[in-house]
Amino acid sequence: MILGLSLSVFIGLALGLLGGGGSILAVPLLTYVLGVPTKAAIASSLLIVGVTSLAALVTHARNGLVVWGTGLPFGMAAMLGAYGGGTVTQFVPDSVLLLLFGAMMVSTAVAMLRGKAVSRTSDAPYDAPLSNIVLHGLGVGALAGLVGAGGGFLIVPALVLLGGMPMRKAVATSLLVISMQSFAGFVGHLGHTAFPWLLVLPMTILATLASVLAGLVAKKVRPESLRRGFAWLVMLVALFVVAHQARSAFGHASLYAIVFEQRWPWWIGGLAVAAVALGLLFVENKQLGVSAGCGELGRLPHSPEARSSWRPRFLGGIVLGGMVAALLGGHAPTLAMGSLDQLVHGTAPKLALLFGAGLLIGGGARLAGGCTSGHSIIGTALGARASWLATGLFMVAGFATTRLVLFLHGGV
């Protein structure tokens, strides 16, 4: 309870600073942290976000940033869509709703990471046809009412791209639309959803106070850094939501086990690695290599070239891919380390050993001009003699180490 109330502060901060993102956090918080049923969590998030957006709107309106002429018709159309979406939820299974919500989170995170299109800052005249405003409002509202999300991060780009509205005014106007559609979606849930009022009311109060505070300090925060950090947070939460619901929505338990739980044959992994390596090489003219990416990762704070490189993002994709595979396979992250658990006892010694091994691997890879992926996959494919020699030594050392570990473990 205390954890949930504390985390509700982030709902208000997201709305006050970004003009959206409240429901993206509210639904998983209510569902997975506080144990609220799916439909009740979606409905409750609409109420929390509606009140919080209304409070944040006041600060922006006092600064003259709300474009009422565009926001009101957009909001009224969104209210109709949200009421319809909220009414339809009673006929949609919980797992489907949460999968739709997860997909909405992924698209939101991608839009935030790529969001260079919504960068207009001038105060030149802007306008949009009323028909376009109404159609977009209906679509955004229906999605928000159905899954309890999709408001601000769809409204802000729509306002900027439809009528060329400056970014700060689009953020402020989106709060007007969010508050209108959230209340309409909440009404659509009434009559077929039970609300945990004792939980929702204090969360709403805390989120509202945080949104007001965020509105006061919004000018002092770098929006680009905030947007990117929040996008990665949304992506991680989305992966958890989708993985948690994938089994129930898959339909065939045996097929799910074959695809996600059982170990695939080695040759499938080999073909997949080859496809990625050759695709990068011949389509993008990029050479696959992990150690080079790790080196650029270490230079990120002071190297503009490293920050613009594709390799650190590729490393992030490897980590996210491993997390997705583990979650879909039903394996929560642990400190289990296989045979190392039998040879070394205690978490601290194991971590120290792995840290030392990592230093040796990283230093050796840099001295050798590449790691196993660089030499064994790319180097051998290009016919480099040094890579063939390095790969042979990798294999010999691997066989010898395996035999040594087996001997120490079981006397084999």
Image: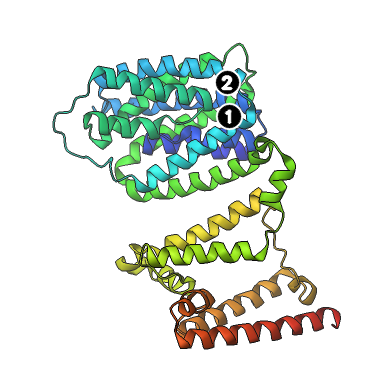
- Specify whether 259 is left or right of 108: right
| In the image, residue 412 above or below residue 302 | below
Q: Name the residue at the top extreme.
A: 191
Where residue 353 sits: x, y (%)? 66, 77
Q: Which mark is residue 9?
A: none
Per the image, the residue denoted by label 1 is 97
- Identified at 29% across, 31% down, the residue is 170
Where residue 166 sits: x, y (%)? 23, 35
Q: CA distance from mark 1 to mark 2?
A: 8 Å
Which residue is nearer to you in this view: 385 or 42? 385
Per the image, the residue denoted by label 2 is 89
User: How many labels were placed on the picture?
Assistant: 2
Q: Amino acid at mark 2?
A: Thr
Which residue is nearer to you in this view: 317 or 42? 317
Q: Are marks 1 and 2 in contact (CB under 8 Å)?
A: yes
Question: The residue tagged with tag 2: helix, strand or loop?
Answer: helix
- Identified at 49% across, 32% down, the residue is 23
Residue 341, picture quadrant: bottom right
Task: Please rate how many residues cluster around mark 1, counting C-alpha atoms within 10 Å: few if below 14, some from 14 to 19, many from 20.
Answer: some
